[in-house]
Image (cartoon, grey):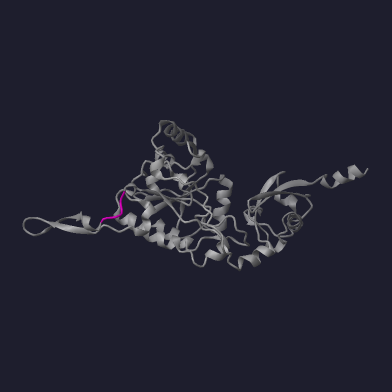
Amino acid sequence: MKLFSCCKPMEGKIPLIIKWSGKEYEVYVSENDTVADLKREILYKTAVRPERQKLLNLKIKGKVSDEECRIATLKLKPNFKIMMMGSLEQDIEEAKTAPTGLPEVVNDFDIEDEEIAIENQEIYLNKVSKRVKDYEVKILNELRPDKKLLVLDIDYTLFDHRTTAQSGVELMRPYLHEFLTSAYADYDIVIWSATNMKWIIEKMKLLGVDRHPDYKIAFYLDSLAMISVHIPKYGIIDVKPLGVIWGKFEQFSSKNTIMFDDIRRNFIMNPKNGLRIRPFREAHINRCRDDELLRLSKYLKDLADHCSDFSTVNHKHWEKYKVKKRRHSRDDKGNKDRDRPDNSGGADES
């Protein structure tokens, strides 16, 4: 009887998976329970208080469900994954004080472009061709003629996805919307994340990127668009080959495409078109002083206005980029004939 009664509380219960702070927690609720009951179960598992829990993809007809909503109304399937944001009380207190003596953590290999000449190897080009053929791109907003292409990572590039917080605004990289608005004037914008499409969509909703009135995202790419490559020193790694996009949309190429990612290895198939952005971590501490996107806005504008081939520029030194001045040539009569570059003020090209 005692053994049977131990299992009895699980009868009629729906198992759900709570994804929070890089971990997954299993909770059980009944159809008659409310969202408030669910949050109490989450409290027992994570110690995050209900008032600090934000359940991102728990919705009714597109609207965030309220506390008294019955689980039955949500029609959740067993093992449905719910993405949660929320801070522990001690984390909130600790976030107010900057830690000292911590080394900078960089999630990247010590890879130099010149050390890995893999971009033209046939085995990987065949993988890219297969992605071009098989991977389906869902266009969110029509591509515009004569625009450059900006490909953006999400985690640590647009927001700090590890730090706990009560809202996306707390984790969003400073000047994100201003940066995207500025870039949209010259670039079609693509989001490419090494995760699944479900979480990309949720993160873009969380940041308000999916519905902003001043810019539009052309489409999303997820981990299924990536390929695996082998590097003798590090083994097999997954990367983001821009050839997948170029193969599907002929208006884009190495001449007019740039990719931002906090992990350099993600663009080793296209090293001349990648810019390693400084990772945005510890949002509570750094959001008041991070101006990376603000400065990169100017760089993108300079490229769009003055560079005819992005692959000729060493993006590693983007902060030192100088616009080439132009001077006028004159005919024999002294009249202005045409513009031509002034090589004395060239860009930092590789």
Residue situated furthest left in the rendering:
333
Residue 68 location (% of width, % of height): 74, 59
Question: How many labels were placed on the picture?
Answer: 0
Image spot of residue 189 (x, y percent): 44, 51
Q: Is residue 283 left or right of residue 72?
A: left
Task: Estimate the x, y position of residue 277 in percent, counting from the top left.
Answer: 45, 54
The magenta segment is 346-350
Q: Residue at x 58, y 52 (%)?
A: 202
Q: Position of residue 280 (x, y in %)?
A: 51, 58
**Nearer to me, 138 or 132:** 132
Q: Where is residue 39, by image quadrant?
A: bottom right
State the residue at coordinates (60%, 62%): 167
In the image, is residue 302 part of the stretch drawn in magenta?
no
In this view, the residue in front, 173 or 186, is 173
Name above or below for residue 237 compared with residue 82.
above
User: Residue 191 or 60: which is nearer the viewer?
Assistant: 191
Q: Is residue 178 left or right of residue 29?
A: left
167 vs 137, left or right, is right
Q: Nearer the viewer, residue 52 or 163?
A: 163
Report the residue that reaches farthest toward the front.
101
Query: Is any atom of residue 21 visible in this view?
Result: yes
